[in-house]
Amino acid sequence: MAQSKTVKTAEFDSIVIGGGLAGLIAAHQLEGTGRKVALIDGLDVLGGSCRTAQTKAGPIDHGLKFIPETQESEETLAWLETVLGEPIQLKRVEAPPLTYDDGKFKPFVGFGDQKIESAAEVSSYAKDRYLQLSTTPKDWIPKLIETFTGTLMTQSYATKMQVDDEFVIEILVNGAKRLSGREVLFCANPQQLARLLPESHVPARLRQKLIKGEFFTSLNLDLVHAAPVTDSQSIHVLKGANEEPCVGLFREPTKMEDGKLVQISQWLTLVHRDITEEPELVASALKQIKRQVKRAYENSLEGLIQERIVVNPSSHGDLVGVLPEDGQWPKLQNLWVVSGLMDPNKNLIGSLRQTRRTLAALAGEPVVAIDQDTDLSEGPQPTA
Ligand SMILES: Cc1cc2nc3c(=O)[nH]c(=O)nc-3n(C[C@H](O)[C@H](O)[C@H](O)COP(=O)(O)OP(=O)(O)OC[C@H]3O[C@@H](n4cnc5c(N)ncnc54)[C@H](O)[C@@H]3O)c2cc1C
């Protein structure tokens, strides 16, 4: 554990900033080594991109959560099993990606010579084989939250980091409250560090990559269709002329409380910058997704039961190789960055792999399974 004069009197051994899947696992594992841990998140719900979404057809995962069948996915999920202390059964699905063109479905084989801004990101979803998991983030997140007994602070946004020499000595929260920790794990989008840290501690090349790098905002649309649309398990890559593609998947049909059989589909399209503040562009991108779905499945939008929209700025992009493997920030001995953007796996597997690498550097990778006998009635209460 990093130690210095400057942080000797720290309130916490570890401060974990960001309570998404990565931050929750990191907090849990560090606590398992006996550290006194504080976990802070800017929102009032934990889980980040993995938080549960409620729909009229029941809870679903936030976003596609598509996991390609690769050795890295399987190895990482095996590690996650040990963290969660429960098995995750994998069903291997072979369903080559589909597209819709000239009035019919065809295998998707790439974009050819079309100039598609998000081609590389979209291609990471267009795989022939993927994994369906017996439990998904919506099951893991509550378990990680319930079993964390450290200090949990929601609605607590890190707004500044104070640095002394080679150490982060204080985190400013919501511009007012101060927290100090011997080590700090930043488990949110690393781009923020360009403004959270003093300018003197963000090397110019790194700043350039964080600010000017290739990032995409994902616009996500979850649809609850009034009746089953298709039994296809394939990833769909749909695209009209002069449009950015959208990718999506139909889930198994589910029964509503009134016995009605419905089907959920989840879609996303990627735009090449943060357009969160541009509502017309968001609206037109979402309309485009619906147009593409309707083109492929003509009656699928009739009597639509629900549509749910989520915008995630800079959720996709590439920061591979900008920091050392374990995520340690240059010239700061107690700051580590954990982000899936730093791993070649462009999905939650990348985020888990990065978490694992940082934990290995900090604590020799202890795997502390959640204690199945923990009395959950005394779990932590979020404090604002
Ligand atoms: C729309 C979408 C679709 C996706 N689709 C897939 C997919 O199909 N397959 C797949 O495998 N993966 C997918 N992913 C990726 C996967 O969800 C993420 O890799 C994973 O959830 C990342 O977890 P994380 O903990 O690293 O970050 P996040 O989930 O982003 O969590 C970061 C947390 O930090 C908090 N935070 C941010 N800034 C601060 C701050 N300054 N102070 C305090 N708290 C802060 C946020 O509130 C958030 O809770 C998708 C992600 C998105 C957004």
Image (tube, rainbow, N blue to C red):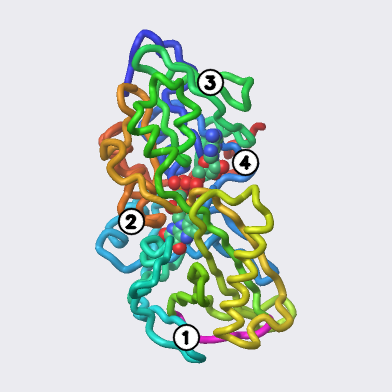
Q: Amino acid at mark 4?
A: Leu
Residue 297, how many percent across, how many down? 58, 86
Name the foreground residue: 153 vs 208.
208
| Precedes in sequence: disc 1 or disc 3 | 1
Please give the name of the residue rendered at 39% of the width and 40% of the height, measured from the top-left corner.
338
Q: Amino acid at mark 1?
A: Asp
Task: Kindly report which numbered mark, 3 or 2, lies closer to the viewer in this rendering.
Answer: 2
What segment is highlighted magenta in the picture?
Answer: 226-233
Furthest-bottom residue in view?
Answer: 103
Residue under numbered circle 3: 179
Residue under numbered circle 4: 43
CA–CA distance in space, label 3 to label 4: 18 Å
Is 42 on the left-hand or right-hand side of 95?
right
Residue under numbered circle 1: 101
Q: Is mark 2 within 8 Å of ligand 1?
A: yes
Name the foreground residue: 338 vs 300.
300
Please give the name of the residue rendered at 31% of the width and 27% of the height, measured from the top-left corner.
330
Q: Up-down: is 165 above or below 363?
A: above
On the rendered image, what quadrant is the C terminus found in? top right
Residue under numbered circle 2: 345
Mark count: 4
On the rendered image, what quadrant is the N terminus found in? top left
Q: Is mark 4 within 8 Å of ligand 1?
A: yes
| Precedes in sequence: disc 3 or disc 4 | 4
